[in-house]
Image (cartoon, rainbow, N blue to C red):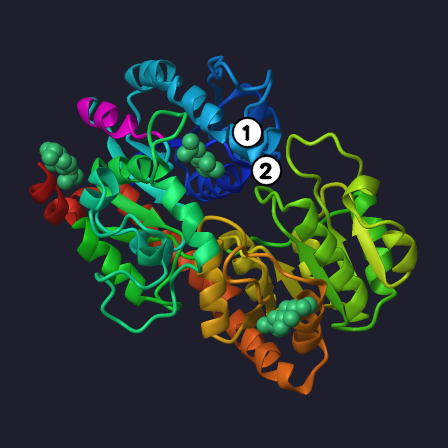
Amino acid sequence: MANNSKLHVVMFPWLAFGHIIPFFELSKFIAQKGHKISFVSTPRNIDRLPKIPSHLVSSITLVKIPLPKVEGLPESAEATMDIRNEDIPYLKKAFDGMETELTRFLENSLPDWVLYDFAPHWLPPVAARLEISRAFFMIINAWFLAFFGPSEILINGSDERKKAEEFMIPPKWVRFETKVAYRRYEANWIVASTQKNDSGVSDIYRGGNVIHGSEVIFIRHCNEFEPDWLKLLEELHHKPVIPVGLMPPQVEEDDSQSWVSIKTWLDDQNIQSVVYVALGSEVTPSQDQIYELALGLELSDVPFFWALRKPSGSDDSYSEILPDGFEERVKGRGMVWKSWAPQLKILSHDSVGAFLTHCGWSSFIEGLSFGHPLIALPFLADQGLNARIIADKQVGIEVPKNEEDGSYTKNNVSDSIKLVMVANEGKQFRDKAKEMSEIFGNKKLHDSYIDNFIKFLENPRFTLSAATSTSA
Ligand SMILES: *[C@@H]1O[C@H](CO)[C@@H](O)[C@H](O)[C@H]1NC(C)=O
Ligand SMILES: *[C@@H]1O[C@H](CO)[C@@H](O)[C@H](O)[C@H]1NC(C)=O
Ligand SMILES: *[C@@H]1O[C@H](CO)[C@@H](O)[C@H](O)[C@H]1NC(C)=O
């Protein structure tokens, strides 16, 4: 394909904003180079996207495909944040119902590429039939994907890996030293995700088929951090694995009322004195876990800014979620912010000294790109493995939890915060995190990954030849 001809790239993320946003960011990078994007999602999700920068508006077309109705899925729910965790399988089932409309769209528009998420296990064969280049875009890092092994195991299961214990050690295909493994309480959840679900198939099966049917894997990872996992992925899947870099987001001008009031509060705090607390948009902690976190923040005596989200699909008021009188007792020292918080702006403020995070990959990247040590409180999916890496790399610590049930106490929270924020022994974590910002926050480095990725889109044949000969 000649370099001066514009590509048409279709993007199709899973229906979770933690997935939609990285797909959207990648779309902007591709559009920036003069290519055309069709960004496909459901109407309500499209309406909730951030604004497209004016210079890219003509290059990015937002395509609305309605979400079919499915019994069990609440009316107007179109993303994971609209529903309770236990209803997610119904959302997946509805998502699978988008196949007909998406296929029609691809048949009519015949794009050069389609980039999709782990969920649409039916999509790669459709794209192959239409001779559309097809790629899995992995918004999470390489260790999470490699931990689950080759697509044979993802699709057909493994006789050796059925019990929680087998996920509590590094798998046999990892031949280098690593701390990456699940704890018991996390492994139980992982075993559940290998089981067939109300959506009809397991998540692992979805991912396996998506990878198996793809010509290439694009992944939000870089060679400067844990590169062994990238090589392992290529060995496991026998196809090119192209890192798109970490895509560290850029802080933008913000004169919104909410940022003005947050900034006023942060301006009054001492330099690097505040712990920023946020558990992301997908995690739903139990009432107990929120209580212990709140009481731990109170006990630590450290200033904090807590971006608190109500559990998705919940009608409880915040006063029912937080311990009695909590906000009154921490007034002045602690701020509980109950609507959407501009995380990047907060992390970029001089008063912030650490980030207590659920360890989602985006938050991991954002925290370290500003050089903040991380206090890890992981819950689901890749988060536990990310927390092991944080501890191993000494860019932070993990809040200790009960090995059996994953519970933690206010003391566990408070001790962790004090260690990272104030103790002399905490200096090593603060220093290491600062050092790591040279990789994580290096815009030039990550821009070069994006350039390389887009060159691949423009001219895939040459680099793909090895892979197509094995998968043909
Ligand atoms: C899964 O098992 C089926 C039936 O044994 C086999 O035909 C198929 O090739 C396997 N899939 C992979 C990806 O190994
Ligand atoms: C379905 O998957 C969810 C996680 O995605 C899990 O919480 C639930 O227990 C699973 N249900 C069944 C019946 O396996
Ligand atoms: C967690 O807290 C409990 C009680 O609050 C304590 O007994 C336990 O030792 C703590 N765990 C660690 C690893 O500090």
Q: Amino acid at mark 1?
A: Ala
Q: Would you say the magenta stretch is mainly helix, strand or loop?
A: helix
Please provide the residue range marked out in magenta: 120-129
Residue at point 7%, 43% (across, down): 469
Does 75 appear in magenta?
Answer: no
Report the residue at 52% width, 35% height from top: 16
For the question of whether residue 72 can be seen, the reply is: yes
Where does residue 103 sit, x and y in percent of width and height? 31, 17
Residue to which mark 2 is pinned = 53
Disc 2, SS: loop
User: Residue 423 occupies which quadrant of the picture?
Assistant: bottom right
Find residue 401 and report its image quarter. Answer: bottom right
Residue matched to label 1: 79
The reply, left or right, for residue 210 in relation to residue 20 is: left
Image quarter for ligand 2: top left
**Residue 293 falls left or right of residue 122:** right
Viewer-nearest of discs 2 and 1: 1
Which residue corresponds to the image point at 91% horizontal and 59% vertical from the top-left?
329
Marks 2 and 1, the one that precedes in the sequence: 2
Q: Secondary structure at mark 1?
A: loop
Relative to the observer, which residue lies in front, 203 or 407?
407
